Image (tube, rainbow, N blue to C red):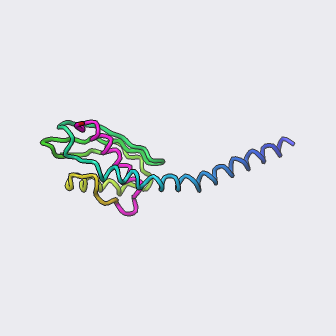
Amino acid sequence: MRIRKVLVGCTIILVALIAASKVLPLVIDAAYPRMRASTRAFQVGSVRDGTYEGKAFLLPVSVRVRASVSGGRLQSIDILKHFNGQGKPAEAIVPRVIEAQSLGVDIISGATHSSLTILKAIENALEKGSTP
C-alpha cells in the first residue's frame, strides 16, 4: 500500500514536470514581442550622464550590467553577471548596442533568450537615469 502511494505521488510529480516543460517555453516565447518592443522604443539619448546598474531575469537566464553614459552617449556596458547556459555568444550584443546607441539592435542568432535578457538588463539600468 505504501509503495502504491509513493508511485502515485511520483507519477503526479512527473506529469506536472512534463506539463511545465511544455507550457513554460510557450509562455516565455509569447513574451518576446512585448519585451522586444520596449527595448526597441527605448531612447538612449534621454538618459542623464552617470553610471547605472540594472538586472533582468528571464528563466533561466539572469543578467546584471553596469552602463555608463557621458555627454548624452552610451560610453560603456559591463556585464557583471550572466548566468546563461548556452547563451554566452549573446554577449556580443553589447558592442552593437554601444555602436548603434540604441537597444534596437538585432538579436544574436542562436542566443535569442540571452540576447533579450541582456537588452532588458541594459534597459533596466538606463531607465534609472532617464529624464521624465
Q: Residue at x 27, y 44 (%)?
A: 78
Q: Quadrant of the C terminus?
A: top left
| Quarter of the image with the N terminus in it | top right
In this view, which residue lies farthest toward the left? Answer: 71
Q: Give the residue drawn at x 31%, y 42%.
A: 65
| Residue 128 picture quarter | top left
**Depicted 116 relative to depicted 66: above or below:** below
Q: Which residues are magenta?
A: 108-131
- Which residue is drawn at the image coordinates 53% and 56% (left, top)? 26
Image quadrant in which you'd find residue 121: top left
Q: Residue at x 68, y 51 (%)?
A: 14
Determine the main secondary structure of the stretch shown in magenta: helix
Closer-to-camera residue (110/38) = 38
Residue 98 in the image: above or below residue 127:
below
* Percent x, y of residue 117: 38, 49
Question: Residue 75 location in percent, x, y?
Answer: 18, 46
